[in-house]
Image: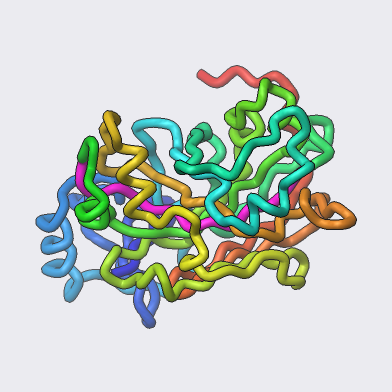
Amino acid sequence: MKFATVRHRGEVRLSVVDEDGFAILPREIGDLVDLIVDSERGLDRVSQSLPNCEVITPTEVEVLAPLQRFRRDILCTGLNYSDHFEEGIGLRGDYEVDRPEHPTFFTKGPDTVIGPYDDICFDPSLSQRWDYEAEIALVIGVAGRSIAESEAMSHVWGFTLANDITQRDVQRAHGGQWLKGKSVDNTMPIGPWMVTRDEIDLDNVQLECRLNGETMQSASLSQMEFKVPRLLAELSWGMTLRPGDLLLTGTPSGVGHARVPQVYLSAGDELVVTATGMGELRNEIAEGSLTEYHLFR
């Protein structure tokens, strides 16, 4: 199944996506996190309710990020395609590293998340080196700690797309840590829906990113240095993963920072990220302010 979070008649609702449009699920099912936590029982409730659901066309809804609430920072994987590691050699400054023998993990703030068709907020006063990173993300469905590789896929609930927009100069400016350069508000689209694990054959997924119509990244997920079971086994070693946790799995080669000449994003650019069976993200780079003081109450 494919699940989307949509705004319909002024209300945020969970829906099932099919060839006819969006089937709006009953309110008592809750949001996507509620459904994930409810496990198989939740999916059974969805199946039972579908014959009576209102089905609406894409023009009648606003498609939002499938996950609307997060219990922790978003978990991320770096340097997980060997060609992406190779293209960055000589560009990491004082933070050059050897080829990783283990997955590289970091986190980013959940306020980065926007919808699959929302504008990416671009503030040139914050950074002059805005870059794209097409990725596949997974959501955890079953809690676990020190998960064995052989059991890892049973802890995955589903998959979605992400574009890990990065400010390269900010990323390099804070002691080699990536949190700051990856956590700028309103910059990471995810979606357009969450696809359940049973619908995706990871080794046959092709991931692509296009900038203004030109293909910049294109790779098979089979090229991952560390496959999903290994990522989950190492990430969960001594550390509990819980239902609703989101993990990005890394980006392939072709990022703007590593190109000759380098390619950075500008206001008015359009980014499209696609992957087999997962739909597409389509986002415009739109200038706005992220550096003016805001007090949220």
- The residue lying at 32 percent from left, 53 percent from top is 229
Residue 245: x, y in percent? 34, 41
Residue 75 sits inside the magenta stretch: no
Residue 194 lies, with reference to residue 143, above or below; the image says: below
Please tell me which residue lies in front, 95 or 167: 95
On screen, residue 154 versus residue 232, left or right, reads left
Residue 111 lies, with reference to residue 121, above or below; the image says: above
Residue 239: x, y in percent? 29, 30
* Residue that sits furthest to the bottom in the current view: 19
On screen, residue 250 versus residue 144, left or right, reads right
Q: Specify the quadrant that holds the N terminus.
A: bottom left
Q: How many labels does the image show?
A: 0
Residue 15: x, y in percent? 32, 62
Q: What stretch is highlighted in magenta?
A: 130-143
Q: Is the magenta stretch mostly helix, strand or loop?
A: strand
Q: Quadrant of residue 4?
A: bottom left
Residue 135 sits inside the magenta stretch: yes
- The residue lying at 38 percent from left, 82 percent from top is 19
Q: Can residue 8 be seen in this view?
A: no
- The residue lying at 72 percent from left, 30 percent from top is 172
Q: Can residue 136 be seen in this view?
A: yes
Colouring rule applied to residues: rainbow
Please tell me which residue lies in front, 148 or 1: 148
- The residue lying at 38 percent from left, 31 percent from top is 72
Q: Quadrant of residue 3?
A: bottom left
* Residue that sits furthest to the right in the current view: 261
Please tell me which residue lies in front, 20 or 188: 188
On screen, residue 201 versus residue 171, left or right, reads left
